[in-house]
Image (cartoon, rainbow, N blue to C red):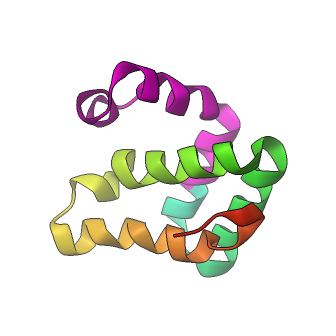
Amino acid sequence: MCARIDEQFDFMQAMALSAEYGEYNHAALKKIYETFMDEAVCKKVGADIYARGGLQALTANCDIFKHCSPLADAIPVVAEQAAVLEYYWDGIGGFSN
């Protein structure tokens, strides 16, 4: 788990996020990052995460991406781009931004 999550969230919330992560979701979020948040890739990955773990997994992985991807350490105008993922995932399985 990234240190940023552990510092900004209480222990139980950090554990809940950690439980929804894993190798599959790490690879999926990495693909989003490596394709520069391509809309089609983001939507496919979101649908796949939802199919595997439901809304809880989708929400947790969105939070992980926003707080733990390399974008989170960028200057604010770049870091805010991570929020675009919420826009792309809006409506997947009831996800709302």
Query: Is 48 drawn above or below residue 35 in the view shown?
Result: above
Return the x and y of residue 53 as percentages of the image width and height.
77, 42
Q: What x and y, as percent, mark residue 70?
A: 33, 52
Count of marks placed on residues: 0
- The residue positioned 70% from the left and 60% from the top of the image is 45
Q: Could you tell whether 4 is left or right of 43 in the image? A: left
Q: Is residue 39 above or below residue 74?
A: below
In the image, residue 89 above or below residue 54? below
Residue 79 versus residue 97: which sits nearer the camera?
Answer: 97
Q: Is residue 8 visible?
A: yes
Examine the rendered structure and indicate whether residue 18 appears above or below residue 85: above
Q: Residue 97 at x, y = what percent? A: 51, 70
Q: Residue at x 40, y 66 (%)?
A: 82
Which residue, as the protein is rendered here, is positioned at the far left? 75
Q: Is residue 2 magenta?
A: yes
Which quadrant holds the N terminus?
top left
Instruction: Using the image as rendered, state which of residue 94 and residue 40 is in the foreground.
Output: 94
> At 23% across and 29% down in the image, what residue appears?
7
Q: Nearer the viewer, residue 86 or 48?
A: 86
Reply yes or no: does residue 66 show up in magenta: no
Res 36 visible:
no
Residue 62 at what x, y percent from top left? 52, 54
Q: Residue 31: which quarter of the image?
A: bottom right
| Residue depicted at x 79% and y 55% | 48
Quick check: 26 left or right of 5?
A: right
Asked if residue 88 lies left or right of residue 14, the reply is right
In the visual, does 12 lie left or right of 38?
Answer: left
Residue numbers of the magenta segment: 1-30
User: Which secondary structure type mostly characterizes the magenta part of the structure?
Assistant: helix
